[in-house]
Amino acid sequence: MKRLLPLVVLVMAFSASGQTPEQDAAIKNGVVQKPIEATAICRDGTQSTSPDRKKACDGHKGIGAWLADRPAPEKLITALSDVEVAEKIKNIEKSKKFTVTYDKFQDITRVSSQILVVKIGTGLFKSNLLMRISCAGKGRDLQKTGRQYYIAFEAFSSDWSFLRNHDLIFLTEAGRVNVGDGSWDGRVSKPLLTVGVSEYMSFVVNEADLRTLAESRSIEFQLGSYEAVLDSKHREAFQNMYIYTAMRK
């Protein structure tokens, strides 16, 4: 009997909420989406619309997940309405995080993000990359002509880190985005008392892949042999670039 006791306790712990372990984990981790007007999901699986957290789920085994203060999940950018897109474009222009230039001699419009810092490597091999996202197209209206997107990186170090290998691969929840090896250029520089090198890499990205990156909530990438995780500022730059160049009316 002593051997069975832990097993009995374990089963009781799993079934105390009246739900499966998967359902409990979903509630605990906030996976359950907020139903319309519901303020809480109770532990017996029912929903409560009471605004009072102390009274919600009375008689229903208590609150499993409180939803009233949780922000609504962010929309995918391609699900935005025309009004929402126009508002986002207005905010992008106000933020000055992008520059838009028109070359009248070549009849080309260019849109470029501000320079973003990306941390790569670990420990003693930790370093920074400078990243910029850009778009170029013929004419003044990018909606009426073909658009081409680019991602550029610049690295500074004491040795050639990307000379032999500068393949770029993104990893998102939607899958891999294999950009390829792009173009590479490098030069020797002499900052202060040391001698270092700077490397510049540019990659062409098609619009479908940019959309994948723009809609991703998690982005990792590998450049050569270096890996990095992009933060919210980097993801926002992809989102804003796609909205500003591909979705404006």
Image (tube, rainbow, N blue to C red):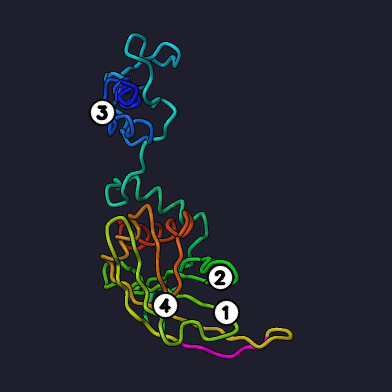
Nearest the viewer among 180 and 123 is: 123
The vertical placement of 87 against 207, above or below, is above
Q: How far apart are labels 3 and 4 at the CA level?
A: 44 Å
Amino acid marked by disc 2? Asn
- In the drawing, what numbered circle is on residue 67? none
Name which residue lies at 35% across and 81% down.
181
The verdict on residue 153 being magenta is no
The earlier-in-sequence mark between 2 and 1 is 2
Where is residue 94? Give x, y as percent.
Answer: 51, 54
- The residue at which mark 3 appears reads as 20
The earlier-in-sequence mark between 3 and 4 is 3
- The residue at which mark 4 appears reads as 224
Residue 166 falls left or right of residue 144? right
Eye-nearest disc, 2 or 4: 4
Dot 2 crowding, Cα within 10 Å, few <14, some 14–19, many 20+: some
Badge 4 element:
loop
Q: How far apart are labels 2 and 1 at the CA level?
A: 8 Å
Amino acid marked by disc 1? Phe
The vertical placement of 142 against 57, above or below, is below
Quarter the C terminus occupies: bottom left
Please provide the residue range marked out in magenta: 185-190
- The residue at which mark 2 appears reads as 128
Quarter the N terminus occupies: top left
Eye-nearest disc, 1 or 3: 3
- The residue at which mark 1 appears reads as 156
Cβ–Cβ under 8 Å for marks 4 and 1: no
Name which residue lies at 32% across and 78% down.
180
Quarter where residue 12 is shown: top left
The earlier-in-sequence mark between 4 and 1 is 1
